[in-house]
Image: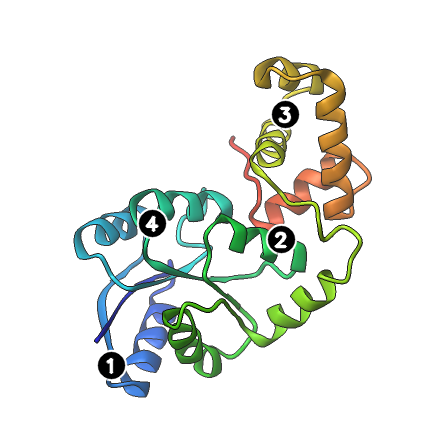
């Protein structure tokens, strides 16, 4: 019996995912269905499900990167499926690097993707829904494919999103000023942005940064 945790801020979405799984495969058992990230983290710790299927919108104040990091901090072994709107192949690649096992693009038909996603990740293989997979394959032909959104880049992106100037970021991170300018330029290329404001808006929209206030 495969134990599955469901998480979404939308009750109808939770009900739909539950019906798809329970009616489509006798070996699936829903351990919990939560509508907040905090409840999901508690359930992960206490119930130890095999698979967690979580919406990127589970906590509107938490970017998808932070959501993945928080899940991995309490449940490093769970197979993590994300339902989201990210459709940049390089960013999808970065999500997998961070610990995502499968990604379902929200516009793809859940009834066609959810059961294959669960069974695929349980076989220790990554899963991408059709639209996401097509974008990922295209991105892997890009000359930028070898540059990852690593911890340093994510920190710079987060600080930029908080309105910190480049010199202050360099001081806070303890690195040369030119390093921060280099990382910022890489970030702009990755997101296709020409200004800091454009970069931040794109990163926030994709769930790779968040602003406060």
Tell me the CA gap for discs 3 and 2. Answer: 22 Å
The vertical placement of 35 against 208, above or below, is: below
The answer to whether the residue labelled 3 contacts the one labelled 4, judged by CB atoms less than 8 Å apart, is no
Q: Which mark is residue 163?
A: 3
Q: Secondary structure at mark 2?
A: helix
Tell me the CA gap for discs 1 and 2. Answer: 32 Å
- Determine which residue is flagged by label 4: 76
Q: Secondary structure at mark 3?
A: loop
Picture quadrant where residue 117 is located: bottom left
Question: Which quadrant of the figure contains the N terminus?
Answer: bottom left
What residue lies at 60% left-to-right and 32% top-to-bottom? Answer: 152
Q: Give the class, few, some or many, for how many residues have Cα within 10 Å of label 1's Cα (few <14, many ≥20).
A: few
What residue lies at 57% left-to-right and 45% top-to-bottom? Answer: 208
Q: Position of residue 144 (x, y in %)?
A: 76, 50
Choose mark 1 or mark 3, whichever is in front. Answer: 1
Specify which label sits upstream in the sequence, 3 or 2: 2
Specify which label sits upstream in the sequence, 4 or 1: 1
Specify which label sits upstream in the sequence, 1 or 3: 1
Tell me the CA gap for discs 4 and 1. Answer: 23 Å
Choose mark 3 or mark 4, whichever is in front. Answer: 4
The answer to whether the residue labelled 1 contacts the one labelled 2, judged by CB atoms less than 8 Å apart, is no
The vertical placement of 24 against 213, above or below, is: below
Q: Is residue 89 visible?
A: yes
What residue lies at 71% left-to-right and 32% top-to-bottom? Answer: 183
Tell me the CA gap for discs 2 and 4. Answer: 21 Å
Choose mark 3 or mark 2, whichever is in front. Answer: 2
Q: Is residue 103 left or right of residue 131?
A: left
What residue lies at 70% left-to-right and 24% top-to-bottom? Answer: 180
Specify which label sits upstream in the sequence, 3 or 4: 4
- Determine which residue is flagged by label 2: 91
């Amino acid at each position: 019996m495969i134990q599955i945790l469901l998480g979404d801020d939308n009750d109808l979405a939770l009900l739909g995912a539950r019906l798809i799984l329970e009616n489509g495969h006798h070996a699936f058992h829903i351990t919990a269905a939560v509508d907040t990230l905090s409840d999901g983290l508690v359930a992960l710790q206490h119930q130890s499900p095999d698979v967690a299927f979580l919406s990127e919108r589970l906590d509107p104040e938490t970017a998808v990167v932070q959501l993945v990091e928080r899940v991995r901090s309490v449940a490093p072994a769970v197979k993590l499926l994300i339902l989201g709107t990210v459709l940049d192949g390089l960013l999808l690649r970065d999500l997998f690097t961070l610990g995502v096992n499968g990604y379902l693009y929200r516009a793809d038909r859940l009834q066609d993707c959810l059961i294959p996603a669960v069974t695929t990740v349980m076989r220790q293989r990554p899963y991408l829904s059709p639209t996401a997979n097509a974008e990922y394959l295209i991105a892997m032909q890009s000359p930028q494919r070898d540059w990852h959104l690593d911890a340093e880049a994510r920190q710079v992106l987060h600080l930029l999103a908080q309105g910190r100037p480049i010199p202050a970021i360099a001081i806070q991170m303890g690195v040369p000023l030119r390093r921060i300018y280099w990382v910022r330029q890489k970030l702009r290329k990755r997101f296709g942005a020409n200004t800091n404001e454009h970069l931040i808006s794109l990163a926030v929209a994709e769930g790779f940064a968040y602003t406060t206030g």
